[in-house]
Image (cartoon, grey):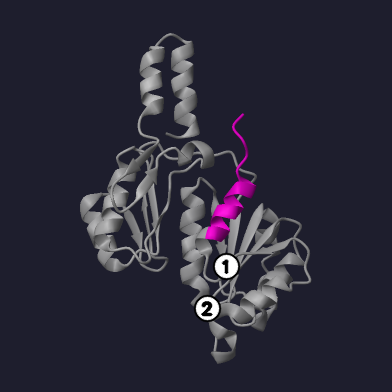
Amino acid sequence: MTPEQLRALLDEVAAGRTDPADAQRRLAWSPTEDIGVATIDHHRALRHGYPEVIFGEGKTPEQIAAIAECIAARGNGLLATRVAPAAAAQLSHLLPGIEYSELGRTAYLSPPDPLTRRTRGPILIITAGTSDLPVAEEAAVTAAAFGNPVTRLNDVGVAGLHRILAAREQLDRASVIIVVAGMEGALPSVVGGLVGVPVIAVPTSVGYGAAFGGIAALLGMLNSCAAGVTVVNIDNGFGAASAASRINVLPPE
């Protein structure tokens, strides 16, 4: 149950269209559900505004499908990250209409009533290079699933600084910016020095040997001299989008 569904139910009780006892039964309906391989938190949407998200890495296709079917049965949509092609095929068979991004390894099932949120504006997702696109795509799908408008700016790393400087209009329109970069991880500092909105930096595991699988970019971002830059874990596009959404989404009127 989402906050919007809860408010609608309470309005029905107040207007006399729904019996209070029936509303109580609906509210008490399995806040958690143990399906053996996982315990689903069905009331997470009441707290977060969106149902529990499935992290697919390390799970079998059968486990992912079982969890997805349980979440989708409540009618609030579904998002899964780090989904391998074999699991995506099983999800597509089980849940027609689910959208799979092979690039971002995400699977998204839109709810019957699309999620609409009051936001401060668009979340802009920037990549330093084309190799950073998989992480950026995970962030973009997540941010959109959470009800945010999303814009993108790709391949504008510091090796060609004029590219990010030429995109000032896009930077100015954004309410939150996610910067995805590998190698030395310098781009978030540049962006942070150009804008006055929150910047969330995502180090990627892109780079040669001394990049140490993203650790060099992570340390560079953590030592940013630009104010207002925060950093998530290596390759964590989902975490960046989740944080950006909490910043961007306004409370209901």
Query: Hey, which residue is sitting farthest left in the picture?
Result: 93
Secondary structure state at the residue bearing disc 1: loop
Question: Does any portion of residue 165 appear in the rendered image?
Answer: no
Look at 48% across and 30% down and name the residue there: 4
Secondary structure state at the residue bearing disc 2: loop
- The magenta stretch spans which residues? 239-253
Q: What residue type is labelled 1?
A: Asn
- Residue 144: x %, y % from top left: 49, 51
Of labels 1 and 2, earlier in sequence is 2
Dots 1 and 2: beta carbons under 8 Å?
no
- Residue 248: x %, y % from top left: 62, 47
CA gap, disc 1 to disc 2?
Answer: 10 Å
- Does residue 110 appear left or right of residue 212 in this picture? left
Question: Magenta region's main secondary structure?
Answer: helix
The residue where tag 1 is placed is: 233
Look at 58% across and 38% down and name the residue there: 118
- Does residue 105 appear left or right of residue 126 in this picture? left
The residue where tag 2 is placed is: 205
Q: Nearer the viewer, residue 241 or 45?
A: 45
Q: Which amino acid does label 2 sit on?
A: Ser
Image: 206 above or below 127: below
- Does residue 79 appear left or right of residue 200 in this picture? left
- Does residue 34 appear left or right of residue 165 in this picture? left
Query: Hey, which residue is sitting farthest top in the picture?
Result: 16
Residue 182 disc label: none
- Residue 223: x %, y % from top left: 73, 74
Mark 2 Cα within 10 Å, few/some/many (few <14, many 20+)? many
- Residue 46: x %, y % from top left: 49, 36
Question: Does any portion of residue 82 appear in the rendered image?
Answer: yes
Image: 246 above or below 167: above
Quadrant housing the C terminus: top right
Mark 1 Cα within 10 Å, few/some/many (few <14, many 20+)? some
